[in-house]
Image (cartoon, grey):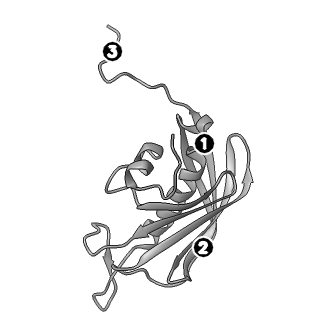
Amino acid sequence: MDLTLPLDYAAIERILPHRSPFLLVDRITEFEVDKRIVGIKNVSLNERYLSYAADGTPVLPPTILTEAVAQVGAIMILAKPENRQRLIYFMGIERVRYRRPVHPGDVVEIEAVVLRLRSRMGLLKGVARVGGKPVVDGTMTFALGPATEQKSPTAQPPS
């Protein structure tokens, strides 16, 4: 797998199992193996999961923003050749703080830094920023599942 930066949407689709509308990362701009990754989420008015504040202003729900942070971290882990066929599981979040709302037109810069990394589990610190100001931060625990078997699209089930 070629990890020439920036990784575009098509390259991200080759790493993560998510697809639109659940793939929330548009681009990866920085990548340090087993250390740090930075991704971009462009928030547009046609996002199907926007919610509306009391004054009618559209905002990105904090849960969607949290998932975007988790996906950036997952890209860092699954981009390693030995993890390519594995599944990553979101195990928990701690000390997550939502600082300010995210609106259509915002460009969210998401950074994930490895705090602890083992062969099957890890802990990441995630921060999402808009205009350099934090909008969400927290730590996320993940686990790696066993390698999945690649099935041929023409393979027939046993009879």
10 Å crowding of disc 3: few (<14), some (14-19), many (20+): few
The answer for how far apart the CA atoms under marks 2 and 1 are is 25 Å
Q: Earlier in the sequence, mark 3 or mark 2?
A: 2
Determine the secondary structure under disc 2. strand
The residue indicated by pointer 2 is 137
Three-letter residue code for mark 3: Pro
Q: Where does residue 142 sit, x and y in percent of width and height?
A: 62, 51
The answer for how far apart the CA atoms under marks 1 and 3 are is 31 Å
x 55%, y 52%: residue:
74
The answer for how far apart the CA atoms under marks 3 and 2 are is 45 Å
1 or 3: mark nearer the eye: 1
Q: Earlier in the sequence, mark 1 or mark 3?
A: 1
x 71%, y 40%: residue:
119
Task: Depth check: give the residue in front, 56 or 44.
Answer: 44
In the rendered view, would you say 106 is above or below 158? below
Left or right of 19 on screen, residue 30: right
The residue indicated by pointer 1 is 80
Three-letter residue code for mark 2: Asp
Q: Where does residue 56 sit, x and y in percent of width and height?
A: 27, 88
Proximity of marks 3 and 2: CB atoms separated by less than 8 Å: no
Residue 25 appearing in the image: no
x 51%, y 43%: residue:
2
Task: Depth check: give the residue in front, 21 or 33.
Answer: 33
The residue indicated by pointer 3 is 157
10 Å crowding of disc 1: few (<14), some (14-19), many (20+): some
Q: Quadrant of residue 57?
A: bottom left
In the rendered view, would you say 84 is above or below 4? above
